[in-house]
Amino acid sequence: MSTNLKVTLGIVAAALVALIGIVVVNRDDAPSPAAAAEMLVRADSHRLSTAADGKVTVVEFLDFECESCLAAYPEVEKLRAEYGDRITYVVRYFPTPSHPNAYNAAHAAEAAARQGKFEAMYKKLFDTATVWGHQQQRQTAVFEGYARELGLDLARFKTDVASAEVEARVKADATDGETLGVRGTPTFFINGTQFTDRPTYDGLKAAIDALLAS
């Protein structure tokens, strides 16, 4: 065997070892199915509907300032209107740092949740996203106006928005998403499996119907 061939084979072997090492590391980093299920839906996760039979659970990781989330929003609302409490629908925060008010919006939603108005604020933020979204200035006053419109205790809302507890709650959702492989928004999981097609009404409906029929 020539010296050049030995060197070549050595390089190939080293590359294969490195590749195997990467695969093993990635496999070790991936959560177990049980851990992934726990991370997808926490005890404090916001459920917009809850199915009594627990047969189908849809989880959406979203950013209120994300244009793709805004585009998916009417599709999701159409889906929710059709299925109601036949499915469990869960919303998780995944604000993108590049969006100037993504975290502020998530904090506003979480502060509203602490007064029992998560869904109302969720809808308000999406319904008005073209008004407050992608503004470089903090939209604090706008979100406080929404809180007032929704009949929230404004003083409590302001305190909660700025609290460490709300910040930690939002970041916990984002951390779960990162661990589960979420890289952008919106990202949907249906019964624990990531939905990789475009999140249209027809696409989501087809996946849900197949599970309901099984």
Image (cartoon, rainbow, N blue to C red):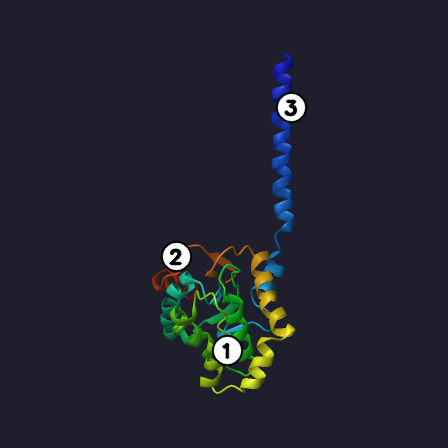
62 or 47: nearer the eye? 62
State which quarter of the image contains the C terminus: bottom left
Q: Which mark is residue 36?
A: none
Mark 2–mark 1 distance (CA, rounded to whole Å): 26 Å
Q: Kindly identify which residue carries mark 3.
A: 10
Q: In which quarter of the image is residue 163?
A: bottom right
Residue ID for mark 2: 198
Q: Position of residue 178 (x, y in %)?
A: 57, 57
The residue wearing badge 1 is: 118
* Three-letter amino acid code of the residue under disc 1: Phe
Nearer the N terminus, badge 3 or badge 2?
Answer: 3
Given the image, on which type of amino acid does mark 2 rest?
A: Arg
**Residue under the image location 38 percent in, 69 percent down:** 130
Residue 135: x %, y % from top left: 44, 66
Q: How busy is the neighbourhood of tag 3: few (under 14 within 10 Å), some, or many (20 plus)?
A: few
Give the residue at x 56% y 60%.
177
Q: How crowded is mark 2: few (under 14 residues within 10 Å), some or many (20 or more)?
A: few
How crowded is the residue under tag 1: few (<14 C-alpha within 10 Å), some, or many (20+)?
some
